């Protein structure tokens, strides 16, 4: 079994290692809620036509596939990620859905987005911003590549405010997730990393203030399942 140092700057290597089981474990460990949450995220898109979308840390492209299937106003959708094996799986899924004319996946770093300022109507990142060394830099980059009146959407794990629910959720993250994730993927350390990054990440009001520091306005935090995850939205 491979072991991983908890280096966020090289977390993409870990995702390459677990890429073949990544989608299965997402569905399994979230009890299928990941699908519902992605559909929920799509509802926060700006209500206008011909949207050009960028998804950071796109992984196997599930966010872009959901957005393009649920919203006919998408002109072009681009996803970037450092984990090339994840992107390969994503490209196969895009081809299977006959969306290669609309969805482009390419190698790229969320902390140094390889696009010019004012290039996109919406920039999204789902369960990825906690995996970077400098989340504030990612938020600055998102703001930079957004057009005026564009929107940033960030979906990330958080912790419930209710003490009982919080304790139950932490038990699940610390105990069940590493065991089940390890059995299915063969890389238990990858799923120990999951709960460690969730517990260490700034969420709720702390994260909305980070977005505001990067220049976003109308910033809102929208809790999912009592705060197990949160969708943050902010406009340029």
Image: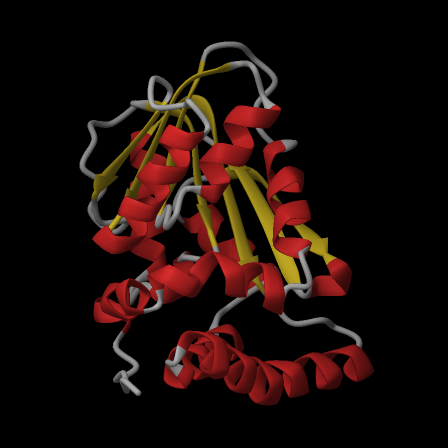
Residue 133 picture location, percent across and down:
28, 67
User: What residue sits 41% from the left and 38% below the top?
Assistant: 93
Question: Residue lying furthest top in this view?
Answer: 49
Q: Is residue 94 left or right of residue 65?
A: left
Quadrant where the C terminus sits is: top left
| Along the line of sight, the residue nearer the viewer: 122 or 191 | 191
Colour logic: secondary structure
Q: Is residue 173 left or right of residue 191?
A: right
Whether 207 is drawn above or below 213: the answer is below
Q: Would you identify the image quadrant in which residue 168 lies? A: bottom right
Whether 78 is drawn above or below 9: the answer is above
Residue 119 picture location, percent across and down:
29, 23
Instruction: Count the labels in the image.
Output: 0
| Along the line of sight, the residue nearer the viewer: 76 or 44 | 76
User: What residue sits 41% from the left and 57% below the top?
Assistant: 128
Whether 115 is drawn above or below 222: the answer is above
User: What residue sits 67% from the left and 66% below the top?
Assistant: 228
Whether 15 is drawn above or below 141: the answer is below
Residue 23 picture location, percent across and down:
48, 56
Quadrant where the N terminus sits is: bottom left
Question: Residue lying furthest front in this view?
Answer: 96
Q: Would you identify the image quadrant in which residue 164 lies? A: bottom right
Residue 59 picture location, percent across and down:
37, 50
User: What residue sits 53% from the left and 30% below the top?
Assistant: 67
């Amino acid at each position: 079994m491979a072991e991983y140092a908890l280096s966020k700057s090289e977390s993409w290597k870990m995702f390459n290692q677990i890429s073949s089981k990544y989608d299965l474990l997402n569905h399994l460990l979230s009890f299928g809620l990941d699908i519902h949450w992605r559909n929920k995220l799509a509802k926060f898109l700006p209500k206008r036509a011909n949207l050009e979308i960028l998804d950071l840390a796109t992984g196997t492209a599930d966010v872009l596939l959901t957005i393009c299937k649920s919203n006919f106003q998408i002109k072009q959708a681009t996803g970037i990620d450092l984990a090339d094996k994840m992107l390969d799986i994503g490209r196969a899924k895009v081809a299977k859905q006959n969306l290669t004319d609309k969805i482009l996946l390419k190698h790229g770093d969320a902390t140094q987005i390889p696009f010019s300022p004012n290039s996109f109507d919406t920039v999204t990142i789902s369960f990825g911003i906690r995996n970077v060394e400098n989340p504030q830099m990612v938020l600055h980059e998102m703001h930079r590549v957004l057009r005026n009146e564009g929107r940033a959407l960030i979906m990330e794990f958080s912790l419930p405010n209710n003490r009982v629910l919080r304790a139950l959720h932490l038990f699940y993250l610390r105990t069940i997730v590493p065991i089940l994730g390890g059995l299915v993927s063969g890389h238990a350390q990858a799923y120990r990393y999951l709960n460690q990054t969730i517990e260490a990440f700034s969420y709720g009001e702390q994260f909305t203030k980070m977005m505001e520091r990067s220049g976003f306005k109308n910033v809102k935090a929208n809790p999912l399942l009592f705060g197990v995850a949160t969708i943050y939205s902010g406009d340029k």
